[in-house]
Amino acid sequence: MSTKFIHDNFLLENKYAEELFHNHSKNQPIIDYHNHLSPQQIAEDKTFENITDVWIHGDHYKWRAMRTLGIDEKFITGNGSDKDKFLNWAKTVPYAMRNPLYHWTHLELARYFDIHELLNEKSAEKIWEQTQEKLTSGNYSCRQLLQKVNAEYVCTTEDPIDNLQYHQQLAKSDYNVKVSTAFRPDKVILIEADDYNSYVDTLANVSGVSINSFDNLLTALRNRIEYFNANGCRISDYGLAQIYFENYTESEVKSIFAKKREGKVISYDEALKFKSAVLIFLCETYHEFGWVQQFHIGALRNNNARMYRLLGPDTGWDSIGDYPQAEKLSAFLNALDTKDKLTKTIIYNLNPADNEVMATMIGNFNDGSVKGKVQWGSGWWFQDQKDGMINQLNTLSNMGLISCFIGMLTDSRSFLSFPRHEYFRRILCNLIGDEIKRGELPNDMEWIGKLVSDISYFNAKEYFKL
């Protein structure tokens, strides 16, 4: 029995789970079809000064845990030294037991740095030095980190106004990991935002379209979709509280947009009609171009107004929202499907109370035209942990076909987050291996091994036509 915490059979509780993982899942390449990595850092092949630079900067999961422990913001996002920030993270880790951060931390230390010592205050200085030596060795640049985990494809996330210059650089390079982008048009949908008009002005400049009407807005968006498509984009993404679908007329939406451009206040109902119209236009256009669309729904963002003013968005002040989802989501998908303009679709819910809703909703629109056309995405954000993954896998198995599932993604800003794929694969294999042991599934390793390898890799490869 290994004395290492992260050992070969970590999370694998019987011989069937071990066989599934080691023979059918472990060595499959990684397709990470949604993340927030910096394409500039990949294109320029950034190297990192120290472990804090690559591991703690930008990681709001770690920041929330450190704040909970009572660590001063100086050592989280403030002007504390990188070493002091790492030492304070090391102090936090033992208190993070049973949080996924504890598993992720030690998986990442093991996989990238071959460090198997538990991280805590006693080991922190030594681990700082060990990681520093490796990070400055010339073998730990952004591109090398992706290669170390056998990444085949990674998809970053960009706003429609992005010029994609770094993706263009990567497309011309000889880098063997394919890097693409996802089109993320949230800002053009959220008409109630205070800075909406300034954003539209920027979109006008980038697209070369003078946006003085709703029709002009749609023309500009189509231009940007065409530009992204020409640069290899085949995926879109949204991060919305919920799917918007209200009945509207063309004249209503044109009037609402004109009103906003004149600087007038938009009512709640007007905003809903506008959001619905833009969403439908975008999704019909994705269908035309053969893109996959993703919807991340259910986050309640920027809850702490004081800290939002100090630090801005995406700094650890978001939580699960309890928005109603089913009725509008159904109506929205149905509106697209009625016109036969529903493209491949992945839906992620943040509220676990919506699990069964999502698992059954996708079945309404899987019409036999494409294997797994409408997907319920893997456990996201607060559900990206062992229980969340197991619940998602069990619910999808009970109400759909787990065999068609396209598996895991990181949704991360960190170049050290890719062992989350391994984490997911171990959980998947153990879940199935346990049922084989109990006699609930047959000991048919040829077929079940194929199912596991499909979920780990091949389903996503087919789905995204890679």
Image (spheres, rainbow, N blue to C red):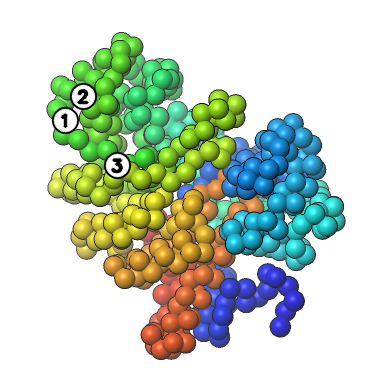
Which is nearer the N-term, disc 2 or disc 1? Answer: 1
In this view of the protein, which residue sits in the foreground, 428 or 371? 428
Percent coordinates x, y for residue 340 in the rendering: 18, 49
Q: Circle 3 sits in a helix, a strand or a loop, which is it?
A: loop
Looking at the image, tell me whether mark 1 or mark 3 is earlier in sequence order.
3
Q: Position of residue 403 (x, y in %)?
A: 36, 71
Three-letter residue code for mark 3: Ile
Distance, label 2 to label 3, CA atoms, is 17 Å
Classify mark 1: residues with Cα within 10 Å, few (<14), some (14-19) or many (20+). some
Place of residue 442 in the rendered image (x, y in percent of width and height, measured from the top left): 39, 88
- Residue named by callout 2: 253
Q: Is residue 122 left or right of residue 236?
A: right
Looking at marks 2 and 3 on the same chain, the residue that comes earlier in the sequence is marked by 3
Real-space Cα distance between discs 2 and 1? 7 Å
Name the residue tied to disc 3. 243
Query: In what element is the residue under mark 1?
Result: loop
Name of the residue lying farthest toward the front: 70
Disc 3 packing (10 Å; few <14; some 14–19; many ≥20)? many
Query: Residue at 77% across / 35% down in the picture?
Result: 80
Where is residue 258, by image quadrant? top left
Q: Quadrant of residue 372?
A: bottom left
Q: Marks 2 and 1: CB-CB under 8 Å?
A: yes
